[in-house]
Image (cartoon, helix red, strand yellow):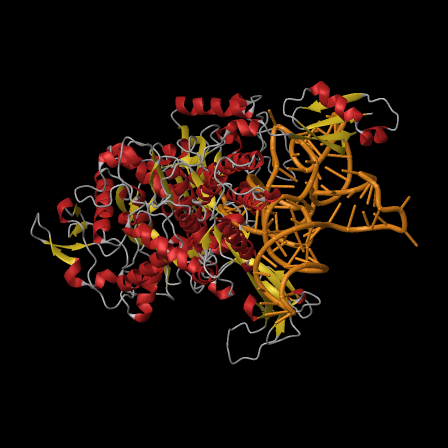
Amino acid sequence: MTYSPDEIEPRWQAYWLENQTFRAVLDTTKPKYYVLDMFPYPSGDGLHVGHPEGFTATDILARYKRMRGFNVLHPMGWDAFGLPAEQYAIKTGTHPRITTQRNIANFRRQIQSMGFSYDWSREIDTTAPDYSRWTQWIFLKLHERGLAYQAEVPVNWCPELGTVLANEEVIDGRSEVGGHPVTRLPLKQWMLRITQYAERLLDDLEDLDWPEPIKKMQREWIGRSEGARIRFPVAGKGADAQQIEVFTTRPDTLFGATYMVLAPEHPLVAEITTAAQRETVQTYIQRTQRRSERDRMADSSEKTGAFTGAFATNPVNNAEIPIWIADYVLAAYGTGAIMAVPGHDERDYLFAKTFDLPIIEVVEGGNLEEAAYTGAGKAINSSFLDGLETAAAKKKMNEWLEAEKLGEASITYKLRDWLFSRQRYWGEPFPVIHRTDGSVSLVPEEDLPLTLPELDDFKPTGENFEAPLARVTDWIEVTDPETGKTAHRDPNTMPQWAGSCWYFLRFIDPENQEAPWSEEAERYWMPVDLYVGGAEHAVLHLLYARFWHKVFFDIGLVHTREPFQKLVNQGMILGESFRYYDDNLDDDPAMKATPYPAQQIRISNEGPRTVDDDRAVKARWAAASDVIIDKSSGEARHARFPELVLESVMEKMSKSRGNVVNPDDVINEFGADSMRLYEMFIGPLEKDAPWSTDGIQGIYRFLQRCWRLVVDDSGEESVNRSLAQGPGSDDQRRLLARTISGVTEDIEAMRFNTAISKLMVFVRDVTRGGDELTQDAAEKLVLMLAPLAPHLAEELWSRLGHSETLAYEPWPEIELQLLEEEMLRIVIQVNGKKRDELEVAKETSDADLEAMALASPRVQSHLSGRKPKKVIVVPGRLVNIVG
RNA sequence: GCCCGGGUGGCGGAAUGGGUAGACGCGGACGACUUAAAAUCGUCUGGCCUUAGUGCCGUGCAGGUUCGAGUCCUGCCCCGGGCACCA
């Protein structure tokens, strides 16, 4: 039999399942290793080849660590609440539960066909009542600690879709799906007080073994700013005047504050606006409300605003300064009001120039005729601060403000509280009851889970912006068990993030009926030692999960401050497609379209346009299979328009581009082992890499070579080769030792591409020079192959005479003394250029090396009689002769 | 605009406490086996040179440090990603 993955792989997958080979059992006598993938959302499209990249990496680690004697927890589950199933339900009337179960079954089948060593007895589905019960339980805990509250906040309402969208579904003020406009309108929402944990979320990043860019993104998202809060009394209102509080990072520039700006939504705007200015202000406020978020950001170089007619007193010098409103001041950040220091802030400078407001220089170092100076320098025109450097001036001003009770040092964060409710059906219902008096009571723990009612129509309730659940009267209306009065349930559901905030904790104890997890399991398994997933979750999922984990820590439910000790982001697998452009902008199939080659197109702000007549066109993609490659020129041409030359593009895989590769097809053709190895071989895990069907051939050939080292398949029937017994030749033993050493190092560092390369070298060289392969070398090769290509390894292991799985065989040991005995290759350079090479024993002295180098005829010819000025000997590496 | 990554053969990529640039794989060329093809195996494969030499050039560009630079420093260019009025 030749190497036949289609026969070997299903057989071993069945064996692993039947024997529960990878079942993890809590065992405190063994060290644990918890290796976790970001669990997927089971979409209707099934897996694409990008998914298994991270899963393969964690599987290699899981299998390797088992062979290293670790008790490995390696689970898989489904983040199964979510929008696509609900959108599909709206369109087709199919219940999301049905879609979800179907998709999960497909995902499970695909994942199992990759041969991953998951402990399937721990499989989780976030939509299962047994799971959502505990998600709701956690909500109760958050509520008890005052971390969940309700507030009237603006949400993204999309009239076209008739639904409210989550922030992450809105891109540039338009819906991600369909590109429809989205407006903001206030609705009563559940909020989680993540801001209370801002400082700890920031500080605890320090000790995490995470990629630096991810930590940085989290730091910036939290956005800590040190400064001061300063209170400005509104002028002319006497002793009981209102005060406007501002936050500034530059209290040292207070003498330069020449006006104030409130956000248009600021509560004091209505009160302080003078009669004369009322109309102007009203008009401006209406205008900013109409302006979309997108416009507001796009025109940041233009400043707009309106004068309220009111003045404030600068507390440091009693100067009367005008109060303006402008949409460049954000209501939700700081106090929603600023003191404007046009001399030393670019935005204030631009605003002052636009409205002709005074600019005072209070920090030396710039030229205020040209631009604001935002750097540090000596304070001037600032009375008691004059002459002080910026840092000292800030400190002194803060002390002065505190002494005068006009303000105090303060810290502000960009991080906002987490909007936690969605006007959706397919999510966890809130375990609360709203009483008619507006108070809220919690559903008792023992009554959980609160499950979703059945529904036929999943459309949102358009008119009053309510979730579909609001229509289910017999579910919504309840009797309050405490008062006996009518009350109602919350029609909103939790966002998809809720389930993924704690799934890694359920994995450690998934059957527990008394608690979300047991203390014993948590003490043993947590934290997650290695967490692998896409960088797109850099802030949201990872920040939310860290937040919940810290709350669990405070309640005493977990013993570590952080859930994920080491984080690795796998890159994206890119697909190849071919691009051209056409002028059918409306996607009207009846319209006759003219296609354009990529060369005739330039990309402007509004999108692609033709070079000659500047006509707007649309980018189109042709799948690689629909393209004709011109052999002589190498040009790609469109199948239907052969005169059209296409440009090849490597991009994220998506249906619309026709560049999606289905793992099922790859497995059918080459097998799961080839697919696993190829994904690991194309480059470093963290980097994006293009998928190539040609490249996988090389991997397949390599696996065949491994097969043939053990199996003789030249005849009709395959026979296991009779391998040499005994230790084998020194060359073979040294090669083996070198390979084990390199492969071990590479796997530990997750450099799987170079690990595979070293195994290829071993297989290429092991029978060179006529040495017969020994049983020992073959077994060690198979063991090294086991984490990477487990099906082939199991098969060869059994053909080598073993009856048990190799999953728990010890990882091969290195014979260190063999590495020591190796000869060294020393490069001989003359003036830094390689001229010769010597093979010497490891213990050769520097002096001997120098003598041998000088004796080389090649060196002598390049020196052409000159005396060497200097000889540099780098032990074990090279000799450089300078002459 | 700001902040991260990253530019190495036809392609994916190796090599960074400075020390043989191009491991390994794809693609390509030639050869062996075969009636033939596929598969397999073997050899070669950065560029240049009518001196074919272990000759010269070569890791985005221009400089610098060093006996020696893909690796370190300075200044640019290009590509990818993130953030974007956060006071």
Viewer-closest of A486 and A838: A838
Q: Looking at the image, which residue is at 29% across and 31% down?
A: A559
In which quadrant of the rendered image does the C terminus of chain A lie? top right
Q: Quadrant of residue A59?
A: top left
Q: Quadrant of residue A735?
A: top right
Q: Is residue A241 visible?
A: no
Q: Residue furthest left?
A: A484
Q: Is residue A507 above or below residue A553?
A: below
- Horizontally, is A545 left or right of A368 in the view? left
Position in image of residue A312 (x %, y %): 44, 37
Q: Is residue A850 visible?
A: yes
In which quadrant of the rendered image does the N terminus of chain A lie? bottom left
Numbered disc total? 0
Position in image of residue A475 (x %, y %): 16, 60
Q: Looking at the image, which residue is at 39% across and 42% down?
A: A63
Q: Quadrant of residue A97?
A: bottom left
Viewer-closest of A547 and A75: A75
Viewer-closest of A115 and A198: A115
Q: Is residue A634 above or below residue A185?
A: below
Viewer-closest of A576 and B45: B45
- Horizontally, is A563 left or right of A772 in the view? left
Position in image of residue B50 (x %, y %): 90, 51
Position in image of residue A774 (x %, y %): 50, 41
- Horizontally, is A192 left or right of A688 in the view? left
